Image (cartoon, rainbow, N blue to C red):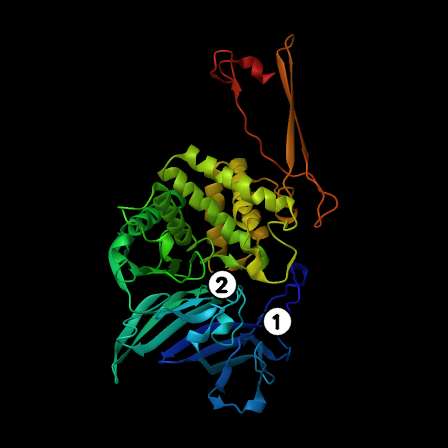
Amino acid sequence: MTSHAPKFLKDHTPPEFLIDQADLVFDIQKNSTWVVSSLKLRRNTLFTGKKSPLVLHMGDYEIQSVTADGIPLQTHEYNADGRHFQLTDTKDHVSLDIGVVLYPKKNTRLEGLYKSNHIFCTQCEAEGFRQITPFLDRPDIMTTYSCTIIADKKECPVLLSNGNLVDSGDLEGNRHYVRWEDPFKKPSYLFALVAGDLCNIQDKFITGSGKKVTLKIFAKQNNVEKCRHAMACLKQAMQWDQDRFNLRYDLDTYQIVAIDDFNAGAMENKGLNIFNAKYVLADPKSATDEDFMNIQKVIGHEYFHNWTGNRVTLKNWFQLSLKEGLTVFRDQEFSSDLNSRSVERIANVKKLRMFQFPEDSGPMAHPVRPDSYIKMDNFYTMTVYEKGAELIRMIHQLLGETTFQEGMTLYFKRFDGMAVTIEDFLSVMAQASQSDLTQFKLWYTQSGTPMVAMDRSYDPDTQKLTLTFTQQTLPDRNQDIKLPLHIPVQFALIDAAGNEATLQEHPSLLQ
């Protein structure tokens, strides 16, 4: 049984090497898949002058070949133990070609590249890319990718990856190939590949700048007509992100694949979202209103990640809520603007109270940004997602819509194409609002749900109403002493006739 040593936020250090370019070739055979990765690496300028070896993450596979700067290496010139690949003699710049053989049909861990029901599919978040090829599999390694896929035309007529399709053609033996190039840097967890016999529906979307984007949703033939609602939701999400956040889509094609056996709910891989089919398919004859609403929300959520998570991503996995909490807030606002805001808010608060509050008061309690983890997959929690979204909502409430949008604009302008932290996000919000959010940061580092009590007293002689708020957060295994949190409070006063009292109508309220 594999043991996992704890990882601590305090121990995070910058990478010693960077990968500027990754060119991948997948040759899909009947029982195996050959993968060749061509990497252009360089030593991080922060470590100039050091002679430390190059160490890459790797999975449980055998390496077939290694070439460094065009020179084939013998097995004694590198080390590979199934967890790490190490090249001892490493220059500051090196071109590395590594060939491996994968067995997707035998991949029952469903990380990296696997095959299920005749469909080849990848899942790389959080640390699945290392199961495909040796790599610096961490979110702060921002790399541009190309991907060439070769396969049998009958078994895999559809070959998909991230980015724009730049080449395709036929090969001998009834085989064919495609080449995809993604011009935007991304971390390895956003890489995606899908190959198999799928059908699709198509549409288009024209951005505010006049860019024409081809939209495709893929599914099995018997399900493809059930994708119409998802396509409508995608176009709604693209329009809403333009109108509300002034964010436009950046590639020529946006693709969604609905797979029955996808092991997650949905994944925001750059330009190629992979969904469990239940979040895409809707038969108008049998789907419920809840089905339609869930599809709208999840389609929107994964699309909104294109900017909050993909174009601006995470410096390390401790910052997970920076993309998930922020994007949950955005999908909640999307649903609120398109439907009933009050109904959406009630549903979100109900979900928070039913699932996140118990998590925050039980043995699984942890901060929105944890100090440590043993296995990253365990931190995809209600606290990171739903409580994280509430923290963004409080910032929005403190700043107001106009100032919040100014902060978001500054966030994308300053950090586009970069891997950042929660402090980076708070810094631009503080700058946009000219406010101090130091106390607010405690929400990210302190676990538990504060209990807020209000005492109300009214003096009829002076017509003065006094509201006194107190808060208490119980100690837990994370902190013995809980510090006071910055909590925005919004309230209204109702007069004797049942109407909301305003300062203009009741000037005594100013006293």
Q: Which mark, residue 214?
A: none
Label 1 Cα neighbours within 10 Å, binned few <14 / some 14-19 / many ≥20: few
- Asked whether the viewer can see residue 334, the reply is yes
- Asked whether the viewer can see residue 432, the reply is no
Q: Residue at x 39, y 78 (%)?
A: 25
Three-letter amino acid code at the position of disc 1 = Thr
Q: Nearer the viewer, residue 243 or 198?
A: 198
* Residue 377 horizontal/vertical position (percent): 55, 60
Say which residue label 2 marks.
Answer: 125
Which residue is the extreme one toward the right? Answer: 480
Q: Residue at x 63, y 9 (%)?
A: 460
Q: Quadrant of the N terminus?
A: bottom right
Tag nearer the camera, 1 or 2: 1
Q: Residue at x 49, y 48 (%)?
A: 326
Q: Describe residue 66's horizontal placement relative to residue 167 as left or right.
A: right
* Residue 84 horizontal/vertical position (percent): 58, 77
Q: Nearer the viewer, residue 428 or 377?
A: 377
Q: Residue at x 51, y 80 (%)?
A: 61
Say which residue label 1 marks.
Answer: 2
Q: Is residue 355 above or below residue 415?
A: above
Distance between the alpha carbons at the discs numbered 1 and 2: 19 Å
Picture mark count: 2
Q: Describe residue 347's horizontal placement relative to residue 475 as left or right.
A: left
Mark 1 lies on a secondary structure that is loop
Q: Describe residue 465's horizontal placement relative to residue 418 as left or right.
A: right
Q: Earlier in the sequence, mark 1 or mark 2?
A: 1
* Residue 251 horizontal/vertical position (percent): 34, 60
Q: Quadrant of the C terminus?
A: top right
